[in-house]
Image (tube, helix red, strand yellow):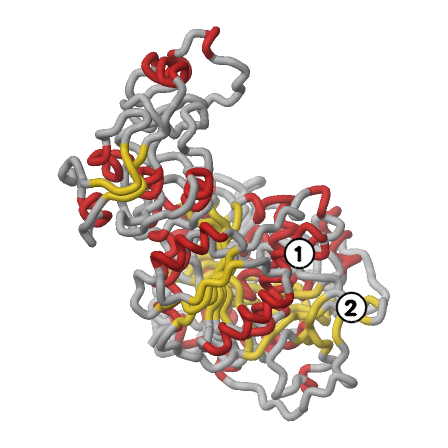
Amino acid sequence: MTGTGNTNAYLQNAKRNKNDEFYTTYGTIEKEISNYKSSFHGKTVFCNCDDPYESNFSKFFIKHFNDYGLKRLICISYSNSPFAGTQLSLFGDTISSGHGQLLDITEIPDKRRALSDYDIQQIILNSGVEYLKGNGDFRSAESIQYLKQSDIVVTNPPFSLFRELISLLSKYKKNFLLIGNMNAINYKEIFPLIKNNQAWLGYNNGEMAFKVPRDTEPHKTRYWVDKNGQKWRSLGNAMWFTNMDVKYRHQKMRLTQKYNKKIYPTFDNYDAIFIPTIKDIPDDYNGVMAVPITILTRYNPDQFEIVGEANHGSDNSYDLFKPVINGKLTYKRILIRKIQPLKKVTRFNILDLFSGAGGLSYGMHKNKNFTTKVALDFNKWAGETFKRNMPDTDVIVGDITDSKIKESVISASKKAQVNMIVGGPPCQGFSLKGKKLGLKDPRNFLFIEYLRIVQELQPEVFVIENVKALLSTSAGWFKKQITNKIEGMGYHVSVGVLNAKDFGVPQSRQRAIFICSKSITIPLPEPVVSEYTTVRDAIEDLAFLNSGEGSFEQEYANEPTSEYQRIMRAKGGKLYNHKASNHKRIAIDKLKLIPPEKGKEYLPKEMLGNQQFKSTWGRLVWDTISPTIDTRFDAASNGKNNHPFLNRAITPREAARIQSFDDSFIFYGPKVYVRQQIGNAVPPLMAKAIANQINRFLGN
């Protein structure tokens, strides 16, 4: 049925007693719904918590059925409502216990005449109100079938079920106008909708009067009984929630204040300033601002972005911190930031930190608008490989924590007009043991160094890639730490897990990706392939070496057999890094016992040794994707890295192909460093997809 609540104490009490159905007055309904008149034309309205006889929602839409141009009106009652049957005596009807009621109207005759209350009663009586099979609960399969047929849901649900109703409406993508209580803003089911501009507040919020059930206990305030014996409650924080357009969302607030750090204190635990009232929002501050929750009654998504909220502790993932200033807890706040004019970028000049061999940069170079100007890595062989393959890049080899190295990186980047940073900073401190310290854990110093350089250079966009587990460890606590830090620096953040296989890479390789932009939220790229590239597609043409054979440079022995192989060979020339490991005789003998595309299950027990992992001694399977390539792919006993049928592990070139490096990309250095360069690299085709996505949102 219809209801809402007014205080936390009352909300908890109502949840216990389920006595939370408040009936809305006709005037309250008319005052709000009249603002959306044109939005109802040709629509089916569903009042799924509303007794056809008792509810003012049903009466309002019957009265305005024709002048609003409705197509259909559906109202369903809940049989166990404390209001059920309180007016039925007026119509000579009786209640069928345990069954909800259904009113379904598709036409109101005599379209020219205004309807009186008596007319409305007669229409209800003559409309053939039916009993449902069930009790009319809006969550029932019976009610959901009517929900699917509707366009707009308008009701005042029991506030204890508010989050369930709005979740249901979101699932079925329905427009809605619902009365709720201000506390609902903070619910984990609702705040994300508000933050992401999928729901907002209506026109009339605050004081509302409601009829309450006859067994409602008296209250000291906001309670009265009228001359007919009807009990009433008045709520000071009732609100209309909707996803239908409202005028104030197109009207910019006039900001008259100027930022002064003495007037606007910063929170103890988050980089945001405290704003006492809405009228105090400064017009010259671009960082995160903590404003009163009433901002939502004037919020314009073209003027501000909602970053999250500062609550006193909730299950909402956007509840970023407890609002504490000088050790004192303040009121709840909504966190906003001014929308900055979108700055289009003609050229993305990249600084690649922790660059390794350069998989990120090499992939991004496949978009003509991206060029890596400066790269840094502490390994000289990785630097050599990067420089040989991308000779126009200023490659610096050294430790990022060395002040001289850092100074040279920053100086070179400023000179090259770097406006983008990419990299995969190590963060060993993100573990359960390190949770107390988070980003302050000394093991995360390299991650912090990355962010310090971001702070120094202020790029338009930066990308962080890391291990997938970073996002899920401690139920996402570390992900939240990082996101809070980046947002506090003034950047919009999109974060998630990408799998290389979705971007044409013949390998399942999941990586955590953060795309951070000053101007706009850039979502992670969607998959670009409908069919995965297989191991056969990637390396079938390279199947001509046995253990110990091959060389750093040689001719191709076979013609390409797939489009992927032709792309890998597109630049022509020689074949590099295709040299098979010189396995020991015992390793070759074991591989001889393993049939094509099979694994260690074919080895006798006496040959298994102490290896515990199921995938050891496994062969790749031709017509599937490869598992993740690591830094020991050339060892026969290491995982599923052996050739599908030859008695050897895959070569560096085959591993590079599976990583999506084309054959013109040559790896330099001793064997151990080459396999590290390949195994640690970001697959270029995945990097290309990230570059294309950034260019789509920021490029000219």
Disc 2 residue type (three-letter):
Asp
- Residue 463 visible: no
Q: Quadrant of the C terminus?
A: bottom left
Residue 516 at x, y percent in the picture: 51, 65
144 left or right, relative to 688: right
Asked which secondary structure carries label 2, the reply is loop
Per the image, the residue denoted by label 2 is: 268
Query: Which residue: 79% across, 57% down?
Result: 9
Residue 629 at x, y percent in the picture: 41, 38
The image shows residue 468, relative to residue 251, as above or below, that is above
Asked which secondary structure carries label 1, the reply is helix
Which residue occupies the extreme bottom position in the image?
256
633 left or right, relative to 457: left
Q: Which mark is residue 266?
A: none
For disc 1, the neighbor class at 10 Å (few under 14, some 14 to 19, many from 20) is some
Q: Please state which of residues 459 and 356 is positioned toward the viewer in this rendering.
A: 356
Q: Please state which of residues 373 and 322 is positioned toward the viewer in this rendering.
A: 373
The image shows residue 110, relative to residue 626, as above or below, that is below
Contact (CB < 8 A) between labels 2 and 1? no
Which residue occupies the extreme left position in the image?
559
Q: Which mark is residue 445?
A: 1
Q: Nearer the viewer, mark 2 or mark 1?
A: 1
Residue 269 at x, y percent in the picture: 75, 65
561 left or right, relative to 113: left
Q: CA distance from mark 2 to mark 1?
A: 22 Å
- Residue 425 visible: yes
First reached walking from the N terminus: tag 2 or tag 1: 2
Disc 1 residue type (three-letter):
Phe
Tally of numbered tags = 2
Q: Quadrant of the N terminus?
A: bottom right
Query: Which residue: 43% across, 28% down?
Result: 635
